[in-house]
Image (tube, rainbow, N blue to C red):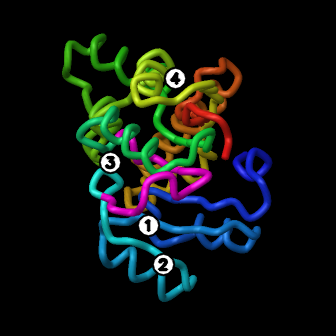
Amino acid sequence: MIAPRLAAGASILDVGSGGGAFLAVASAAGFSVTGLEPDSQRAALARSTYGVTVHETRLEDCTLPEASFQAVVAFCVIAHVESPLRFLQAAACLLQPGGLLFLHTPAADGLYKLVAAATYRGSLGRVGGPLRHQYMPWGHRYILGPRAMGAALEGAGFVTAEFSPYSNPAEITNRRFDARPAWQRLPLTGAVTAINAASRVSGRTNHLAVFAHRSGAVS
């Protein structure tokens, strides 16, 4: 998804790099990789496991030189930040002119969120668990749709935004229910699997893959 859009050996900054899985894959593919991870334990795990460079900082506080990277990627990060616009401005600052930004984020019009919101309204607020699940367990602050995301990208100096629907496989999503007793786990996993399948058919997937380029000529 990302590699075909980059030149061989391109420099990539992974924001919120966690335990370093993406850094390891990208490095093995021949790219020059650097991670940002504010959690010191996860950053140390990435370094010790994969031998990659990881700085313990948020993107907004990063002091790396401007225009250091040909690509910035952030998997499920922008939904957690205090200010999406400030986050995107910081990404633009670290990208070379024409550089690629890739974001993976929950979709505002995803079928799961629409079903959760309808359930909440239909029950007059008595069934709020599915909707809260979009925000509370994962610390989501913002779930932006293409219109809001496009406006934020433009305000931060990005052009040629492209939005692609994406859903995590149900077997990954359903892992959150592993600790539940069977009488809860089975109907929950069944419902999530059905919603995931319907989301792909309807085009209202639960995540967005976002591609954009920093304005300016490619260096």
Q: Judge depth for marks 2 and 4 and give the one in front.
A: 2
In the rendered image of this protein, does residue 202 appear above or below residue 129? above
Query: Neighbour class for label 4 at 10 Å: few (<14), some, many (≥20)?
Result: many
Check if mark 4's residue and mark 3's residue have beta carbons within 8 Å.
no
Question: Residue at position x 54%, y 51% from top?
Answer: 72
State the residue position of label 2.
46
- The residue carrying mark 4 is 111
Earlier in the chain: of badge 1 and badge 2, it is 1
Mark 2: give few (<14), some (14-19) or many (20+) Cα within 10 Å.
many
> Mark 1 to mark 4: distance in Å?
28 Å
Kind of residue sitting beneath label 2 = Ala
Tags 1 and 2 touching, CB below 8 Å? yes
Kind of element beneath mark 2: helix
Locate residue 16: give its quadrant: bottom left
Whether residues under marks 1 and 4 lie with C-beta atoms below 8 angstroms apart, the answer is: no
User: Looking at numbered disc 3 in the image, what kind of residue is underneath it?
Assistant: Trp
Q: Closer to us: mark 1 or mark 4?
A: 1
Residue underneath mark 3: 138
Q: Residues within 10 Å of mark 3 (few under 14, many from 20)?
A: few
> Looking at the image, is mark 3 or mark 2 earlier in the sequence?
2
**Residue range highlighted in magenta:** 62-79
Q: Is residue 194 visible?
A: yes
Q: CA distance from mark 4 to mark 3?
A: 18 Å
Residue drawn at 47 percent across, 72 percent down: 19
For marks 4 and 3 on the same chain, the one whose residue lies earlier in the sequence: 4
Q: Is residue 214 left or right of residue 147?
A: right
Q: Residue at x 52, y 48 (%)?
A: 95
Can residue 199 be seen? no
For the residues labelled 3 and 1, the Cα–Cα distance comes to 14 Å
